[in-house]
Image: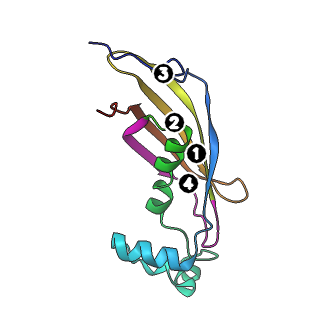
Amino acid sequence: MTEAAPADWPKTGETIAPAAFGPFGLAQLAGYALASGDDNPIHLDAAAAVAVGLEAPPVHGMLMMSCFEPALRRWRGDIVIASLSGKFLRPISVGGTVTITGRVARSSLAPHPELLLRLKAQGPNGELAILAEATVRRAAAAP
């Protein structure tokens, strides 16, 4: 059975409005390291980051990936992520911000409303940090 899509269901080619996150401070990185178990010193210690060729401690990649879900929920409150994958291209340093943007690569209605999204996370100077792809579906209606 095909589920009906809302009249304003996105079409292929539509864009996702930019959503900014951060700045990511050392305290936030330390909290994320504690919660995630990723306590790699390059994320928390400037000397360790410099020793591996970075200018400053980088924001955890998965912390940046976690920005996609709220960005998509701001765009459309009626969707849920079915899958999300990303490729990390360059680090964003502590103190930096991330802006999430994207577009609808495919919109389908059958057997249920679903979108394939191509997404980007860009740093404060527009540098491409993550290329991602997500499949989202219409959230189940509340009872």
Q: Magenta segment, which residues?
A: 79-97
Q: Real-space Cα distance between discs 4 and 2?
A: 27 Å
Q: Amino acid at mark 3?
A: Ser
Q: Where in the figure is residue 38, as x and y percent of width and height?
A: 37, 72
Q: Amino acid at mark 2?
A: Arg
Q: Where in the figure is residue 37, as x and y percent of width and height?
A: 33, 73
Give the residue furthest to the top.
1
- Residue at 47% over, 54% down: 65
Q: Which residue is mark 1?
A: 120
Crowding around mark 4 (Cα neighbors within 10 Å: few <14, some 14 to 19, many 20+) is few
Precedes in sequence: disc 2 or disc 3? 2
Q: Which residue is mark 4?
A: 89
Q: Report the mark closest to the observer, 1 or 3.
A: 3
Crowding around mark 2 (Cα neighbors within 10 Å: few <14, some 14 to 19, many 20+) is some
Q: Amino acid at mark 4?
A: Leu
Q: Which residue is mark 2?
A: 76
Give the residue furthest to the right.
125
